[in-house]
Image (cartoon, rainbow, N blue to C red):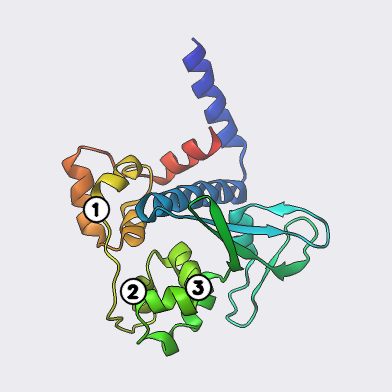
């Protein structure tokens, strides 16, 4: 009886959400899982962070990303409460400490890549950390980011990904897992099907987001 009531409550909650609220819930849940997968693969945590200087609201990562303009020259996000625009940061956690870097949106990362095509991964991290880590958050790997602007990138990062992605199979779309792991979606799809795990659907994402 308790389980039935719980399921009924979740269905009712989903029905009450507006289209915009559903989209927000799914995007937020997907971003949370994506960041967790990135941490699992790399052993480092990445957290978009912003506190509005005008009204004091602490923005959620999804609010930061949704507040960006699709403008490579505007590095500000928008506070959903007071609409003030300001620059957000990315906290890069490693070994219990963190560095705070400027955080760029997906299009801003792509706009800054072309002059860096000959820069190795190690040099990229050292000399352009804000671009590198923002690329990881939005595009999975730097090579993926270069591919999106049609430029071959000679350097790559490889991960022992199969064991690390197992908890995320069926919880995230294969395409997202593949992007973060730096492999093709067909490889992830085959790996998931071999474990008889159903593909992630939009309905699954919404249900898990509102539980």
Q: Where residue 113 appears, x then y in whole percent?
A: 44, 83
Q: Crowding near pointer 2: few (<14 within 10 Å), some, many (20+)?
A: many
Q: Is residue 42 left or right of residue 19?
A: left
The mark lying in front, picked from 3 and 2, is: 3
From the image, tell me which residue sits under label 1.
188
Q: Earlier in the sequence, mark 3 or mark 2?
A: 3
Which secondary structure, mark 1? helix
Q: Where residue 65 appears, x then y in whole percent?
A: 59, 62
- CA distance for labels 3 and 1: 28 Å
In the picture, the disc for residue 143 is 2
Which secondary structure, mark 3? helix
Q: Where residue 119 appears, x then y in whole percent?
A: 37, 84
Which secondary structure, mark 2? helix
Q: Earlier in the sequence, mark 1 or mark 2?
A: 2
From the image, tell me which residue sits under label 3.
129
Vertical order, 46 against 4 (above or below): below
Q: Crowding near pointer 1: few (<14 within 10 Å), some, many (20+)?
A: many
Q: Where residue 173 appears, x then y in whole percent?
A: 35, 51
Q: Residue at x 24, y 49 (%)?
A: 162
Q: Are marks 3 and 1 in contact (CB under 8 Å)?
A: no
Quarter assignment of residue 70: bottom right
């Amino acid at each position: 009886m308790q389980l039935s009531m719980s399921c009924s409550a979740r269905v009712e909650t989903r029905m009450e959400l507006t289209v915009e609220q559903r989209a927000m819930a799914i995007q937020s849940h997907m971003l949370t899982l994506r960041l967790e997968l990135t941490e699992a693969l790399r052993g480092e945590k990445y957290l978009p962070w912003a506190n509005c200087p005008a009204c004091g609201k602490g923005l959620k990562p999804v609010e930061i990303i949704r507040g960006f303009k699709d403008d490579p020259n505007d590095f500000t996000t928008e506070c959903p409460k007071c609409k003030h625009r300001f620059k957000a940061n990315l906290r890069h956690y490693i070994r219990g400490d963190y560095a705070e870097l400027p955080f760029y949106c997906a299009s801003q990362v792509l706009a800054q890549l072309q002059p860096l095509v000959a820069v190795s991964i190690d040099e990229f991290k050292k000399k352009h950390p804000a671009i590198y880590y923002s690329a990881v958050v939005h595009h999975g790997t730097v090579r993926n980011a270069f591919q999106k602007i049609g430029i071959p990138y000679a350097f790559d990062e490889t991960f022992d990904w199969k064991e690390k992605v197992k908890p995320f199979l069926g919880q995230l779309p294969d395409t997202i897992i593949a992007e973060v792991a730096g492999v093709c979606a067909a490889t992830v799809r085959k790996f998931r099907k071999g474990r008889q795990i159903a593909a992630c659907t939009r309905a699954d994402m919404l249900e898990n987001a509102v539980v």
